[in-house]
């Protein structure tokens, strides 16, 4: 499933940015499940972490902001 940055809620965007920097142990379970369902995060032994697709989405947005 392909998701655009603008389709995400502010809470989802913030969670992805935080997950991109490292573990996010205080991530609400429902939010984590939603990000997993969207393919932007994945379940791991240590909890939910950002997926490759999620990381690409965040980095793409950050790079686009630098160019503006």
Image: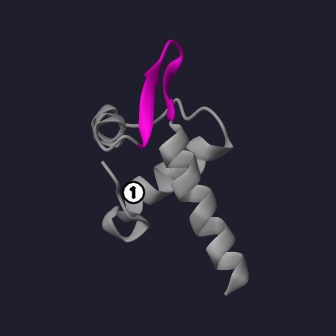
Above or below residue 58? Residue 19 is above
Mark 1, secondary structure of its residue: helix
Task: Check disc 1 and report the residue beneath it.
Answer: 11
Q: What is the x, y in percent for residue 23?
A: 60, 32
Report the label total. Answer: 1
In the current view of this chain or complex, which residue is farthest to the bottom?
A: 68
Residue plotted at (34% across, 61% down) = 8
Q: What is the x, y in percent for residue 53?
A: 49, 45
Residue plotted at (33% across, 42% down) = 31
In the picture, measured across the screen, residue 2 lies left or right of residue 21, that is left
Q: Nearer the viewer, residue 23 or 7?
A: 7
In the picture, measured across the screen, residue 65 lies left or right of residue 53, that is right
Q: Nearer the viewer, residue 62 or 25?
A: 62
In the current view of this chain or complex, which residue is farthest to the front?
A: 1
**Quadrant in the picture for residue 68:** bottom right
**Quadrant in the picture for residue 29:** top left
Residue plotted at (57% across, 42% down) = 19
Q: Nearer the viewer, residue 68 or 24?
A: 68
Above or below residue 60? Residue 66 is below
Above or below residue 19? Residue 58 is below
| Predominant SS of the magenta segment | strand
Q: What is the x, y in percent for residue 33?
A: 30, 34
Q: Magenta stretch?
A: 40-50
In the picture, measured across the screen, residue 68 lies left or right of residue 15, that is right
Residue plotted at (43% across, 29% down) = 42
Is 44 inside the magenta-drawn segment?
yes
């Amino acid at each position: 499933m392909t998701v655009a940055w603008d389709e995400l809620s502010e809470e989802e965007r913030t969670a992805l940015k935080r997950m991109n920097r490292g573990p996010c142990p205080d991530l609400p379970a429902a939010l984590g499940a939603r990000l997993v369902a969207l393919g932007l995060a994945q379940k791991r032994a240590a909890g939910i972490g950002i997926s490759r697709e999620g990381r690409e989405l965040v980095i793409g947005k950050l790079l686009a902001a630098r160019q503006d």
